[in-house]
Image (cartoon, rainbow, N blue to C red):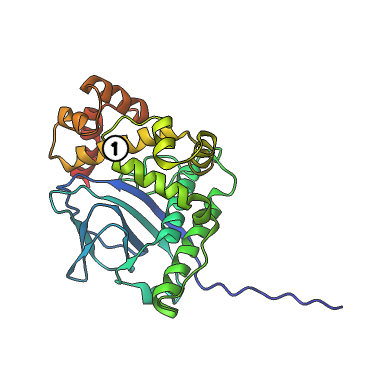
């Protein structure tokens, strides 16, 4: 038999990556605005913002994503109450499909959220520097790279994200897509149920025994699920969730550190400070100063 090869025809090709950011902004942050010669998307991971693009003020909530085209002036406004977490990625792409995504407010579901998470993970593997530094205008490669193929995976995940969004909202609105490997690996019914349980009990002191009892799950199965999904034990994951909640409260700028400590069920402000520094490498005061400084400079 004489086999013939078939050249694959790509629908979305990422030529270059410009920026990969994960911003944790204060609740009163205001970005003065900019325009540039590459595509950029803003996705709200937590909180709410208003985006100004083409002279229109557009509200975005958690799970919303918007694409800014090359040359489009845009800026970000917060509401003074809720501190947002944002994923911002700049890239070069000349594929015609991008024109259909321009300016539309789309919703990121579990599949797309998992792809975004993988982009952030691989960016940390591929490049040095802080992803929350608005002054980082050039991605500096790690030497040596932390994980083989990290740069290629960033492009692959970004192309897959664009294809998913285009299929869902442009070419086949409402189409049910098959879960990506990243999504199916991370998300499962038991995992999601226990994460929701933790979020509802952030103010409490949870133990493995109490989590197992309240969720009707065995200790070994519980640990296995979280180690496979997150690479850590379930209590470490819960303490990280507490710390993320503390960071959000600090950036909301509505409570002092003692009130935040009490709100999240820590036995004392000193214990809260130790745990916060253990996980973030900074004290709450240092974190607040760092985020405020970045917000003021942006």
- Decide if residue 16 is on the left or right side of residue 207: right
* Residue 277 falls in image quadrant: top left
Q: In the image shown, does 279 or 189 lie closer to the viewer?
A: 189
Q: Is residue 134 visible?
A: no
Can you tell which quarter of the image residue 113 is in? bottom left
Q: Residue at x 24, y 50 (%)?
A: 84
Q: Residue at 28% across / 57% down in the picture?
A: 62
Picture coordinates of residue 196, whole percent (x, y)? 35, 47
Would you place residue 44 above or below residue 223 in this image?
below
Q: Report x, y in % for residue 167.
A: 45, 74
Q: Which element is circle 1 on?
A: loop
Relative to residue 160, is residue 31 drawn left or right? left
Relative to 128, residue 31 above or below: below
What residue is at 42 percent from the left and 49 percent from the top? Answer: 192
Quadrant of the rendering where the N terminus is positioned: bottom right
Q: Is residue 274 visible?
A: yes
Position in image of residue 87 (x %, y %)? 34, 53
Where does the image place residue 61, in percent across and percent down from the top left?
25, 59
Q: Which residue is mark 1?
A: 202
Crowdedness of circle 1 by 10 Å Cα count: few (<14), some, many (20+)? some
253 over 20 or under it: above or below: above
In this view, the residue in front, 143 or 249, is 249
Q: Quadrant of residue 270?
A: top left
Q: Residue furthest right?
A: 1
Q: Residue sitting at 18 percent across and 49 percent down?
A: 82
Q: How many marks?
A: 1
């Amino acid at each position: 038999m004489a086999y013939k090869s078939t050249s694959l025809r790509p629908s979305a090709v990422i030529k270059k990556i410009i920026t990969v950011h994960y911003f944790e902004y204060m609740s009163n942050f205001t970005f003065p605005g900019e325009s540039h010669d590459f595509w950029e998307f803003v996705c709200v991971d937590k909180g709410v913002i208003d985006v100004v693009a083409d002279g229109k003020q557009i509200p975005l909530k958690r799970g919303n994503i918007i694409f800014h085209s090359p040359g489009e002036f845009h800026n970000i406004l917060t509401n003074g109450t809720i501190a947002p977490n944002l994923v911002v990625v700049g890239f070069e792409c000349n594929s015609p499909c991008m024109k259909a995504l321009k300016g539309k407010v789309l919703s990121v579901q579990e599949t797309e959220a998992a792809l975004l998470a993988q982009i952030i993970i691989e960016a940390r593997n591929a490049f040095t520097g802080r992803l929350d530094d608005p002054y980082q205008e050039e991605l500096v490669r790690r030497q040596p790279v932390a994980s083989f193929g990290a740069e290629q995976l960033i492009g692959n995940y970004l192309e897959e994200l664009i294809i998913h969004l285009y299929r869902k909202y442009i070419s086949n609105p409402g189409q049910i897509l098959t879960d990506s490997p990243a999504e199916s690996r991370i998300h499962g019914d038991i995992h999601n149920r226990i994460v929701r349980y933790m979020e509802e009990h952030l103010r409490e002191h949870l133990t493995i025994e109490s989590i197992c009892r309240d969720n009707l799950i065995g200790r070994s199965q519980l640990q296995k699920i979280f180690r496979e999904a997150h690479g850590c034990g379930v209590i470490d994951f819960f303490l990280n969730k507490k710390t993320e909640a503390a960071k959000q409260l600090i950036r909301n700028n509505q409570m002092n550190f003692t009130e935040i400590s009490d709100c999240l069920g820590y036995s004392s402000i000193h214990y809260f400070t130790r745990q916060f520094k253990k996980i973030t490498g900074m004290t709450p005061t240092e974190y607040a100063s760092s985020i405020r400084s970045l917000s003021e400079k942006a």
